[in-house]
Amino acid sequence: MKRVTGIGGVFFKADDPKKLKEWYGKHLGFNVQEWGVVFPWLETDKPDAKAPATTSWSPFKNATDYFKPSEKQFMFNYRVENLVELLNVLKEEGVQIVGEIQEFDYGKFGWIMDPEGNKIELWEPKDDGF
């Protein structure tokens, strides 16, 4: 079973997410949406070598609860192929699971904690949901 297949996104806390997104748009050319940016790319390990994929970038308000129970300023999102199966294996391995799986048009999400208190988001994507 594959576990992580790539980085799905980088999320971090900011004093003024709106202003920061504007800065990245102006100075680095990010195509910023209200919630952040999606960087499209192709998965090269798929049989047709043309499978669309995305990586997200998104600043959150400092007061966000989305990273809890972590107190860290950032959270990584990792792409996975079978979220339910992976969470079951991780639980058997003693990894702390946080919350319940959530499903949206663009994929399923689950969360775990690493030994240093970093919350990690696991994403089984539906890249065509974007």
Image: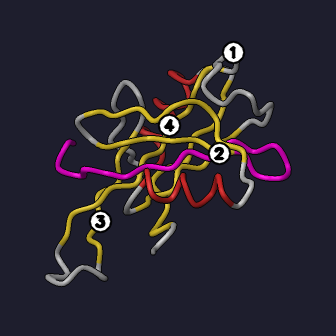
Q: Disc 2 designates what residue?
A: 112
Ranked by sequence position, the earlier of labels 1 and 4 is 4
Ranked by sequence position, the earlier of labels 2 and 3 is 3
Q: Disc 3 designates what residue?
A: 41
- Residue type at numbered disc 2: Ile
Ranked by sequence position, the earlier of labels 3 and 1 is 3
| Secondary structure under the numbered disc 1 in the rendered image | loop
Tell me how far mark 2 sits from mark 3, CA to CA. 26 Å
- Residue type at numbered disc 3: Trp
Ranked by sequence position, the earlier of labels 4 and 2 is 4
Foreground mark, 4 or 2, reads: 2
For the record, the magenta segment spans 113-130
Q: Disc 4 designates what residue?
A: 58
User: Callout 2: 10 Å neighbours few (<14), some, many (20+)?
Assistant: some
Residue under the image location 29 percent in, 65 percent down: 41
Asked which quadrant contains residue 17, the reply is top right
| Secondary structure under the numbered disc 2 in the rendered image | strand
> Farthest right residue?
116
- Residue type at numbered disc 4: Ser
Tell me how far mark 4 sits from mark 3, CA to CA. 17 Å
User: Callout 3: 10 Å neighbours few (<14), some, many (20+)?
Assistant: few
Residue 81 location (% of width, % of height): 37, 63
Q: Disc 1 designates what residue?
A: 63
In reply to whether residue 128 is colored magenta, the answer given is yes
